Amino acid sequence: MKKILKVPKVSIKPFISLIAATKIPKAPLIFGLILSIFTTIVGLGIPLLTRELVDGFSFATLSVPLILAIIAFFIVQAVFDGVSMYLLAYVGQKVVARLREMMWLKLVRLPVSYFDNQKSGESVSRLINDTGIVKDLITQHFPQFISGLISIIGAIIILLIMDWKMTLIMLISVPITVAVMMPLGSKMAKISRGLQDETATFTGTIQQTISEVRLMKSSNAESFEETRGTQGINTLLKLGLREAKIFALVGPIMHTVIMIVIVMIIGYGGIRVANGTMTTGSLVAFLLYLFQIIFPITSFAMFFTQLQKAKGATEKIIEILELPLEQGQDGIEMDIKDKPIRLQDVSFSYDGEEPVIQNVTFEANPGEMVAFAGPSGGGKTTLFGLLERYYEPTSGEIFVGDTPISKLSLVSWRKQIGYVSQESAMMAGSIRDNLCYGLTEEVTDERLWEVTKMAYADQFIKEFENGLDTEIGERGVKLSGGQRQRIAIARAFLRNPKILLMDEATASLDSESESIVQQALARLMEGRTTFVIAHRLSTIVDANKIIFIEKGRITGVGSHEELIENHELYRKYAEQQLT
């Protein structure tokens, strides 16, 4: 709980700057605020009309025009208030939509390294929950604050003109209310900030658990997740109860203050009415104005609490918006066909830690198959991450021809690369959606069936009732591993890549599926520069070049036969797997 008590103060300037950056619709905002102010001013006139009605009330002298005027005031106030509420809600929805758009456009362009260190659920919470807090402030609390301020100032001015002595008695409630509400509002702000952070953490935990439900069940981790989830729920409960305690204090205190002031006004006003120095209508007007002063003051505490929450949310939003984009957004366009790929003294480490790749140098000629072998954790998958440009080398350079790949735009580079991994990542949706994922041009059914046939996937797709439009579930759970692999290969055929990356593409398949996938991969590799990771040497013995990597360093380069002759560990692997 200490993190809740030590909340750093956040300036309001970033909040204002952030809202301004959303290009807030000025006309609806100004018009909505004007109507809100006008509604408040109209409301200030109602007690005066009520005074006239009460003072002159009798069935014999009942003033129809006065009653009609009061009714008209109520109608005008209701209409203006309704229009104002809609306009301000419109502004709030526009602002939150723009904020979410800004955050989403940023998130999808952030480097992979950001997501390596960040729970996806926390980012989702910032995108949905924190922007919602900003919306509530703009659409609800800010207009209430402005109209409440005008209501208080207007009511006090009118009351001072009507009877300054009664006004001074009534104003005793103001410092009492402020003295009570400000400390409570400060505590509420701290608790609210804690709730925001805890909600983001809890969202991340729950999303991770649900997305990996099969891992949870296969690991018999239900009890562990129940405990972890319950702990998060209980933390939120404790914070919620602390918030409820503040509200439980605010309500009775405000009710008591209001009742004391009302009793004082009625008591003193009653004496004045009995003495003939005040009319009954004036006393009624005083009471009405009292409510127009007290209730806005009570809402001020909520405004400042919400402002603190919004400033805290702004801090988190700005943290994301100020993150650097993935490098290479604006590089050059270049056709990499028939160009060699060369790594020159490439080293890489995650977050400045111990190097995972150290001084790696090699070249892949056009059309060659280059395989990476070696112990697990040696850096093979990291090399693929560098080739895919998920990460940038800590030192050294990767060239395509004589051009550093860092000079190419990410779009130009990645659209010429096909990636078939062991996991065969799939998006929720149909087979068609997954085949065409990321493509900007329309693809005909004829072309889709052509590439699925090339990947030996057309037969099982035709067996589905909906064919290409078959829903495959989240991450393709309704398909077998071999089926997912063949769709991934078909997706690569559809993109017609110049370079192919295959990360242990058949490691988790049964013999029958592996045989089919191997045929599809062989067809896909024809005429393409191909990089392969494989633990089973049987899949790479025909590679033009095998690069053996241990602890981030290249310890051997050559054909299968050459490494058998001159690399002891490779020879050991071959004896274990190939004999």
Image (spheres, helix red, strand yellow):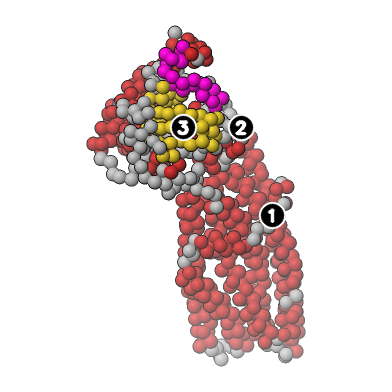
First in residue order: circle 3 vs circle 2:
3
Q: Residue 497 sits in which quadrant?
A: top left
First in residue order: circle 3 vs circle 1:
1
Mark number, residue 354: 2
Front one among 411 and 75: 411
Q: Position of residue 1 (x, y in %)?
A: 71, 46
The residue under label 1 is 8
The residue under label 3 is 343
Q: Tell me the residue at 28%/44% (across/down).
A: 442
Q: What span is in magenta?
A: 546-565
**What is the secondary structure assignment of the residue under circle 1?**
loop
Q: Tell me the residue at 46%/11% (across/down).
A: 565
Residue 195 appearing in the image: yes
Label 3: few (<14), some or many (≥20) within 10 Å? many
Q: Is residue 250 above or below residue 232?
A: below
Amino acid type indicated by mark 1: Pro
3 vs 2, front mark = 3
Amino acid type indicated by mark 3: Leu
- State the CA–CA distance, disc 3 to disc 1: 46 Å
Q: Is residue 109 left or right of residue 250?
A: left
Q: Residue 58 sits in which quadrant?
A: bottom right
Mark number, residue 269: none
| Farthest-out residue, top | 579
Q: Position of residue 254 (x, y in %)?
A: 70, 66
Q: Is residue 558 above or below residue 466?
A: above
- Answer whether labels 3 and 2 touch (C-beta < 8 Å): no
**What is the secondary structure assignment of the residue under circle 2?**
loop
Q: Tell me the residue at 53%/82% (across/down).
A: 70
